[in-house]
Amino acid sequence: MNISQIILILASYLIGAIPFGLLLSRGSGIDIRQQGSKNIGATNVSRLLGKKLGLLTLLLDIAKGYLPMFVAGLVLGDAPNRNLITGLCGAASITGHMFPVYLGFKGGKGVATGLGVFLYLAPRALLGCLAVFLAAVSLSGFVSLGSLLASAAILPGLYFFSEPSWKFILAAYVVVMIWLKHHQNIARLLQGTEKSFKKK
């Protein structure tokens, strides 16, 4: 691993750490870290500031997972360790979103950024995840449940399309981190106190 590859990984973290949800909310006078779910992600932004800003946050969070890997792929070309570095860039961008240096390492839950990572790495497998998410949310009303099930679905999706093992390793890291970051949601789901868009 040379210095330019290390810079790619570090840049991926710093890009992933950009808190777009918080930045977009600044003009509203609402600190999204203090209201709603207190999360900086698209779901909380949508609840507090409306669907338009929520959608914009979602797209930007997806982009910061996709673009670092896309750029890394272009820069690395046919480098012998291309897969390793590209995978590390993806892991770095998600880690940045979850633990952003700009916010004292208190960040989001990584679902949208993970979506961006696998939109680049395995778009066919990602389609199955999106189907699981939509089905789970429409039936239950819980975005958190949809996110958890959809993230887990990437693993069988990768297997189904015979993706290489390094993608499984990255996916396993992403899934574990997303589930750990959702520990409070999991507790509320089990207790029956999680917020549902089907209930006022």
Image: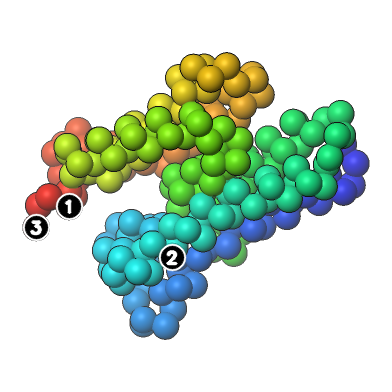
User: Residue 120 location, x and y as percent?
Assistant: 60, 41
Residue at mark 1: 197
Label 1 or label 2, whichever comes before in sequence order: 2
First in sequence, mark 3 or 2: give its number.
Answer: 2
Neighbour class for label 2 at 10 Å: few (<14), some, many (≥20)?
some
Specify whether 193 is left or right of 179.
Answer: left
Is the C-beta separation of discs 3 and 1 under 8 Å? no
Badge 1 element: loop
The type of residue carrying mark 2 is: Leu
- Mark 3 is on which residue type? Lys
- Residues under labels 1 and 2: Cα distance? 20 Å
Disc 3 to disc 1, how far (Cα)? 7 Å
Kindly identify which numbered label has been placed on residue 134: none
Q: Is residue 159 visible?
A: yes
Q: How far across and down, in percent of the image, does residue 176 sit? A: 48, 31
Q: Is residue 198 above or below residue 34?
A: above
Q: Farthest residue toward the left?
A: 200
Image position, residue 4 (x, y; %): 87, 48
Q: Eyeballing the image, is 150 above or below 29?
A: above
Q: Which mark is residue 56?
A: 2
Q: Quadrant of the C terminus?
A: bottom left
